[in-house]
Every structure is written in structure tokens, then in C-alpha cells.
Image: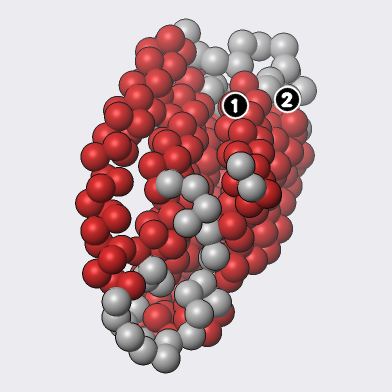
Amino acid sequence: MNAAEATFYYLAAASVGSALLAVTRSNPVHSMLWVLALFLHVAGIFLLLGAEFLAAVQVIVYAGAILIFYLFVVMLLDLPDEEAGPRYGPHWPFAAAAGLSFAALAWLARTQWIGALDGARAVSAAVPGDTPELGSAAAIGFALFGPFALPFEIAGLVLLAAIIGSVVLARRPEVGP
Amino acid sequence: MIVPMGTIMGLSALLFGIGAFGFLARRNIILMVVSIEVMLNAVNLSLAGFSHQLNDSRGQVLALLVIAVAAAEAAVGLGLVLAMNRNRPGAHIADLTSLKW
């Protein structure tokens, strides 16, 4: 096992561990911090997979913006009785069975994809061209403003709708007539 | 490829299963929404793995769009939590039994 493989297995084990801790801690702030650890480890796996731009976006947008937003809301709501009560609903064994069976199904199904993917790799690696390196900001930019221009604009529209929607939802209702 | 594609798919499946369990089992609405983020991250992981395996940048572009949708979902979901918290303090999913306050 070389250094890259050892790094991958460390990152994978730490991701699974922090995800498990994130969904089982009773203190919401501790859960958020474990989710932060999960996001940073997944960003490390992105780096190992050659997706540098995606790793940067994961750290800046996910860990830097979205998670801080969650922490703000957790601290704004001030849930003092959160740790006292049960953290799971009474139906949690069914939830555990559903999660376990999905993970087991996907784990069993993955062995069928490996052979097909190796064939597909041989085909697509034979395409020549002077395209920028895969995973760099240049490659992502050419894809986003080229064949993915319409989905990119629709994503911007989704974000605009979400901004307006959350302002409308979280605004205090006006008193008066 | 440093590890076989199947290893990345297995890791993604495990993370998605953990997120699904968290979404179904937790009582706190905020932690349910965070479990959705864990599931979206698992999907991003497999998309990046496919992109690396197939030597194609489309997987990473799809992962970027997933991140944008996750940001929108977080904004709307937490706005809903704040609006519900104003009418009835607390963030437990089992308390939301009435259709109109």
C-alpha cells in the first residue's frame, strides 16, 4: 500500500466515522462540527480524485458558507431541552433498517459496475485533444459555459428563487391592517 | 486510479445510508436537513469518482450543480424552521401536527 492509498483509506474511515457521529450526537452544535469534519475529509478525497476545483468549492461553499449558516440557526433557536429528550423518534429501528438496506444494496450493486466502467474508460481515454487538465478550474469553466450553459443559468435561477423564498418565509409578519 | 472505482462507490453507499438513517430517525428538524446534506455529499463523492474513472469533466460539473441546489435547499429549509419556530418554540418534527396555527 503506497502513501496515496493509505491517505485514501484514512480519509474514507474518518468520513464514515464523522458521519456516524454527526447523526448520533445529541447536542446539535456537536453534530454540526462532526459534519464539518465530514465535509473536510470528503474535500480531501476530491483532491485525491483529481477534482481540485470541486475540493475548493467544497471547502469554501459547503464548509465555509452552508455549515456556518446551519450553526447560526442552531444558535439562534436556542434549544435548551434538546439534550434532555430522546434524540430519535420511536420509529428509529425502521430508519436504521432502511439506511442499512440501502447501503447494503448499493454495496452489492457496485461490483457489477466495475467491469463496465473499465471498458468505458478505455474508450473515452482514447479521445485526443488539447483540452485543459481534468478537474482544473479551466476545464470546469469550459464545461460550465459551453455544453452546460443552460443548466448553469437554471442553477442561478434556483438560487435566486431560494433567496427570495427564504426572505419571504423568515420575515416577521407586519402588524396592522 | 489510486483505488478501484468499487471502493469509492462503497464509501458513497455507506455515507448515503448513514444520511438516510439520520434523516428518518432524528427528531430535530435542523439535524434532519443536515442529514440531507450528508446524503448529497455522498452523491457528490460518487460523481467525482465517475468523473475520474471515465476521464470526463461532466461528473464534476454535475457535482457543482448539486452543491448549488444544496445551498438553495439549506436556505429554504432553515427559513421554514425559523418561521415555524416563531409560532411554536422548538424544532421537533413530532410537534408539527396541526395544519394551521
Left/right placement of residue B90 relative to residue A146 reads right
Which amino acid is tagged 1?
Leu
Please rate how many residues cluster around mark 1, counting C-alpha atoms within 10 Å: few if below 14, some from 14 to 19, many from 20.
many
The residue located at (30%, 29%) in the rendering is A108
- Residue B71 seen by the camera: no
**Considering only vertical position in the picture, is B16 above or below A104?**
below
Which residue is more in the foreground, A129 or B12?
A129
Residue B77, percent across and down? 51, 46
Mark 1 sits on what residue? A20
The residue located at (43%, 10%) in the rendering is A93
How far apart are labels 1 and 2 at the CA level?
A: 14 Å
**Considering only vertical position in the picture, is A100 above or below B42?**
above
The residue located at (49%, 29%) in the rendering is B18
Which residue is more in the foreground, B13 or A127?
A127
Mark 2 sits on what residue? A27
**Considering only vertical position in the picture, is B27 above or below B63?**
above
Mark nearer the viewer, 1 or 2: 1
Q: Are marks 1 and 2 in contact (CB under 8 Å)?
A: no
Choose the circle earlier in sequence order: 1 or 2.
Answer: 1
